[in-house]
Structures are given as structure tokens and as C-alpha cells.
Image (tube, grey):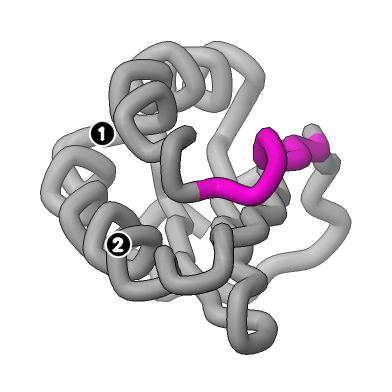
């Protein structure tokens, strides 16, 4: 079951879109190794706008994910037009494969 999540909005500097996408793709193996990260999606919302959506069973898993991602975020900041916005969310409904903890 997933109960909490994150919604992170990222705005790339013009001309840095490929670098942002590469860094998001490169994060996937690390995220896959996190047992408490049940859902992780990296999305393109527009030409320079991206988002990451995550879902977790509880607050401890969400916090562990945030701590694990700090160094990745620090490496990516040079490619962002502004610091990412991070919203902590509550999951009110979800459909995830049963093998993923829903």
C-alpha cells in the first residue's frame, strides 16, 4: 500500500534539457534499489519542464528516498533554471501492480 508521495517540479535552463533528462534516467538504478520507493516516474511536462512523482508506504520511506537523492540533486542544480519545487503529498488512491506493494 502506498500512503505518501512526492511531486517534484523541475525547470531546466534553456539548452540543458538533454542533461536534465540524462540525470533523471541515470537516477533510475538507484531508485530501483530503494525497497521503500514503490512508484517513481520521471516525466516531461513541456519543452523545459519536468516532474518526478514518487509514492511510498510511509514517511520513513519517503524520508530515506529524499536523503538518498540529495547528492544526485546537488549534481543537477547547474542545469536547473531555479531550484526544484518539492511537494509532499498524501496518496488518496493508487493503482500499482500487486507485486509492488499495493
Label tally:
2
Residue 46 drawn at (x, y percent): 67, 86
Return the mark for residue 19.
2
* Secondary structure mainly formed by the magenta segment: loop
Secondary-structure class at tag 2: helix
Residue 7 drawn at (x, y percent): 71, 50
Nearest the eye: 80 or 1: 80
User: At 65% from the left edge and 71% from the top edge, which residue is drawn?
Assistant: 49
Residue 23 visible within the image: yes
Distance, label 2 to label 1, CA atoms, is 24 Å
User: At 69% from the left edge and 68% from the top edge, which residue is drawn?
Assistant: 94
User: At 32% from the left edge and 73% from the top edge, which residue is drawn?
Assistant: 18
Nearest the eye: 45 or 54: 45
To which quarter of the image does residue 78 belong?
A: top left
User: At 79% from the left edge and 34% from the top edge, which residue is drawn?
Assistant: 88
- For the residues bearing labels 2 and 1, Cβ distance under 8 angstroms: no
Left or right of residue 80, residue 70 in this image? left
Q: Work out which residue is located at the far bottom of the displayed protein and give it.
A: 47
* First of labels 2, 1 by sequence position: 2
Residue 57 drawn at (x, y percent): 56, 35
Return the mark for residue 68.
none
Residue 1 visible within the image: no
Which residues are the magenta region?
Answer: 80-87
Q: Is residue 22 above or below residue 67?
A: below
Q: Which residue is mark 1?
A: 34
To which quarter of the image does residue 82 belong?
A: top right
Residue 85 drawn at (x, y percent): 76, 40
Answer whether residue 86 is magenta in the image.
yes
Q: Is residue 22 above or below residue 34?
A: below
Amino acid at each position: 500500500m502506498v500512503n505518501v508521495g512526492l511531486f517534484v517540479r523541475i525547470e531546466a535552463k534553456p539548452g540543458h534539457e538533454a542533461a536534465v533528462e540524462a540525470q533523471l534516467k541515470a537516477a533510475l538504478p538507484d531508485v530501483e534499489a530503494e525497497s521503500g520507493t514503490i512508484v517513481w516516474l520521471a516525466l516531461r511536462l513541456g519543452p523545459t519542464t519536468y516532474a518526478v512523482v514518487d509514492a511510498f508506504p510511509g514517511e520513513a520511506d519517503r524520508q530515506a528516498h529524499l536523503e538518498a537523492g540529495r547528492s544526485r540533486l546537488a549534481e543537477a542544480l547547474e542545469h536547473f533554471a531555479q531550484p526544484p519545487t518539492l511537494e509532499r503529498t498524501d496518496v488518496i488512491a493508487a493503482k500499482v501492480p500487486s507485486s509492488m506493494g499495493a
